Amino acid sequence: MALGNFSTEAKRSSWGGGEMSRAMGSDGEQREMYEIAREMFRDAMRGKWNAVEEKYRTNPHAPLARITSSADTALHLAVTEGQTEVVRRLTKVVAPETLRLKNDRGDTPLHLAAAHGAVEMCLVFLNADAQLVEARNEDGETPLVLAALHGKSKAFFAIHSKLESGDSGLRHCRRDDGNTILHVAVLGEFFELAFDIIRLYPELVNYNNERGESALHVLAKNPFSFKSGHRFGRIEHILYFCIWVEPLKAKAHSSQYIINQYQEGEHERLVPENCDTCWTVCSLLWKAVNIIAAKCRACALKEDEEDPIENDQDNKDTDQSDEPSTTKKPSKRISFARDQMFPPNYITFFHFLEIVLEFLLVLFGVGIWKIAKLKEKKQKHVWAVQIVEELVIQGSRWGYNEDGSRPLWSLTDTINPNYLPELEDSVQEPVLSSQANKFEVLKPYGLKDKMETPILVAAKTGVIEIVEKILNVFPVSIQDVDEEGKNIILLAVENRQPDVYKLLMKKCMKDWVFQKVDQNGNSALHLAANLGDKRPWIISGAALQMQWEIKWFKFVKQSMPRHFFARLNNRGESAKELFTETHRGLLKEGGKWLTKTAESCSVVAALVATVAFATVTDVPGGIGDDGSPNLQDRFEFSIFAIASLLALCFSVTSLLMFLSILTSRHVVKDFEWNLPRKLVLGLTSLFFSIAAVLVSFCAGHYFVTKERLRYAALPIYVATCIPVVLFAFAQFPLYLDLIKAILTDVPQRTYRDTTV
C-alpha cells in the first residue's frame, strides 16, 4: 500500500463513520481529523508505529480515524502488518468499544487477526473485550468462522477457548449463507481442523446451508480430495503406496490445553535445509524401529487365549479410554480398503516394506522432488476418508426418513442466525411450541421436494469412497432419488462413472435398482446412450471420445441381462436410436479430426518414403563392375542397407494406413475398432520409418567421418536423433491415448484438474 492510497475516499471515511459524526462538530475539527488520519497513515506505511501510538495516547479522536480507503483504523492496519507488540500497546490505551470498529467489509480487528492466524493478537483482543466474539461482518461471519475459513487452527482454538465457560459456541459457528465452520473447513480442505470441529460440535454434521448442503455434500462435490479423483502413473502409484501417512487423531480440548498448545509460537526448524534428506532418512529408520518395537510389545502383552472374557473386558476398557468424552461412537468402524487386502499378520511386513522402499527412494534423491508432493496428496486423501467416516457415523443416529432421500432434520434458511439449538433438545422436542410463532427451528429439507443426498452427489462426481461408506452404514440409501427420479445407478451411468458403476454391480444384488427409470422413462442404457452437453472423457481427439462413448454404451448394455433395461422411453425412443441422434455432432467432429490427422501424417510419411527410396538406390561407395556394392563387406554397410529397407517398408505402410483412413466411411461402428487401429498402425509405422531413415543416414555418413572425426562421430549422430525425440515427445500423449483406448474394455474416468 503506497502513500498515495490515502485518497479522497479515505478523507471522507476519516470522518464519515457514525462515531466520528457524533465526535466531530465543526469543519475545523473535521479538517483536523483528516490531518491526523493522513499523518497516521504515513507513519504506518513508514513503520513509525511509535508515532501512531503517541497519537493514540494524546488525541482522543485518533483511535476513531479511518486511515485507508477501505475504512480501516490504525489498529486494523497494525493487525494486517503483523505488528503484535504494537497491537498490544494500542489495545491498552483505547476504550473497549473502540475495538468493535469495523471497516467497509464489517471486519473488526479481531476478524483480521483470526483470518491471519495471529493467536496472540486474538487473545489480546478477547482479554480486552470478550464480546468481540459476537461481532459479524457483512457476510455474517464471526471471528471463529473466519479462522475456520482460512484454516487457522491455532487462532480457531484460541477463540474457542474463550467460549467454553457456559457457552456452547453454536451461535458463533454459522454465517449468513448457512455455511457453518464445518462447511468452510471442509471446503478449504483443512481436514485436520474439520476433524477437531466434528469432535467439538457433532451437531454440525447434520446442519445444512441455504442450498440444503451439509458438510458431506460439500466433500462429495470435490473429487480431487480423494484418491479416486486422481490418476497416477505406474511409478507414481508405487511411490504412493510406499508413503505412510499418520491418520488424524483426536486431541483434548480443555481451555488450559488449548491455550498452552496454540498460544506457543512457531517451532524453530530442527535441521538446516541442506540436511533435509539426511533427516528424512533418519526419520524413516526411526519409524521402522517403532513399527518393529510395537509389534514386539503387542506379542509380549498378548493375553492367554484360555481367558477370553477378561481379555474382552480389557479391550472394551481400552476402547473406551481412547474414545473422546464428547460423543459416543458406534463400535463398528469402516477400515481402509488397503487393510482388507491382506491378513492382519501381514500388516507389519508391508509397513516395513514401505519404509525400506521409501528409504531407497529418498537415498537416490527421488524424495527431494517427488515424495513430498505425493505425501501431501496422500495425506489429503487419507484424511478426507477419515472425515467422511466421521460424518457418516455421526449422521447415523439421525437416520433416514421415508425412502432415504432426505435426512431427518436440517437447518432451515429462515432460522435465526443468533440461535442454534442443541442437538439433544431438538431430538427430544422436534417442534418447539414456545418458539413456533416466531420462527421455525428445524424441519426436513425445504428448498426442494427432492434434494440430492450426499450419496447421489458422490455418484455424480465419482467419489467411490463416499458411496461405499454410506452404503455400508445406510443400505437403505440405495433407494435415494433426485428431483428427476434418477437413482444412484442412473446418475453414475449418466455422468460416466465406471468405478462407481462397477462398485454398485458388486454391492447391489437387487434387480429393481438397475431396472429403475427416471421421470422421462429413460433407463440406464438410455442415459448411457445420451451424450447431452457433457464431454466427460478427457482424452485427445474427438475420434477417441467417440470410441469411448461406444465402449461405455456397450459396457452398460452387457453388464446386465437384456430385459433389465426398458426398451423405449416416454418419447418412444430406443437406446440405440438415442445414441445415434445425440452423437451426430461428435461423430462429425471425430471424422474431421481423423481426416486432418491422417492428411498431416500422410505428408510426412510420403516425404520419408521418398528419402528412403533414394537411399536404397544410391548406396555409399558406389557399385562395382560386377553390379555389387563396393563396400558390401563392411559392417556399417549392412546396417545402412537394412535401415534403408526398413525405412522404406514402414513409410509405405504408414502411408497406406493414413490413405485408408481418408477413404473410410466414418460410420459409428468404425470408430470402435477399425479407425483407431489404423491410426495406431500408421503412427507406429511412421515412428519406425523416421528412426530407420536416421540410422541409415548415420551409417552412410560414417564412411565419410570415420577417419577425421573418429571420436566426435558418436555425439554428432546422437544430435541427429533429436528430431525423432522431439517428434516422439510431441505425439507420445496421443499415442498413449490411442493404445489405452484400444486395449481398455471399460473407459477410465478422468477429471479436468484445474489446480496448479
Image (cartoon, rainbow, N blue to C red):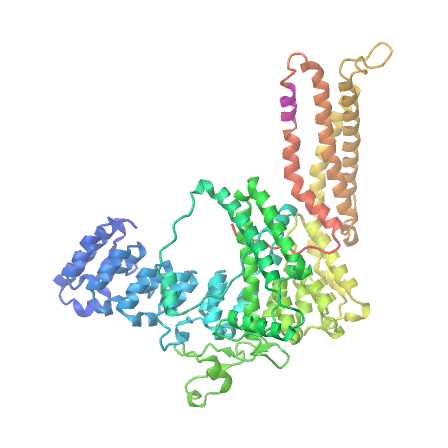
Rendered position, 622 above or below 193? above
Q: Which quadrant of the structure image shows residue 705?
A: top right
Q: Which quadrant of the structure image shows residue 155?
A: bottom left
Rendered position, 731 above or below 329? above
Q: Give the range drawn in magenta.
A: 713-718
Say left or right for 363 vs 583: left
Say left or right for 539 vs 613: left
Q: Does the magenta stretch include residue 714?
A: yes
Q: Where is residue 279 in the image (x, y as percent from the top left)?
A: 49, 45
Rendered position, 57 above or below 607? below
Q: Position of residue 364 (x, y in %)?
A: 57, 39
Q: Can residue 588 be seen in this view?
A: yes
Q: Which quadrant of the structure image shows residue 655?
A: top right
| Residue at the (75%, 39%) spot, across then down | 682
Say left or right for 678 vs 272: right
| Residue at the (24%, 49%) spot, across then down | 47
Magenta region's main secondary structure? helix
Q: Where is residue 248 in the image (x, y as percent from the top left)?
A: 52, 62
Q: Pick the residue in front: 185 or 681.
A: 185
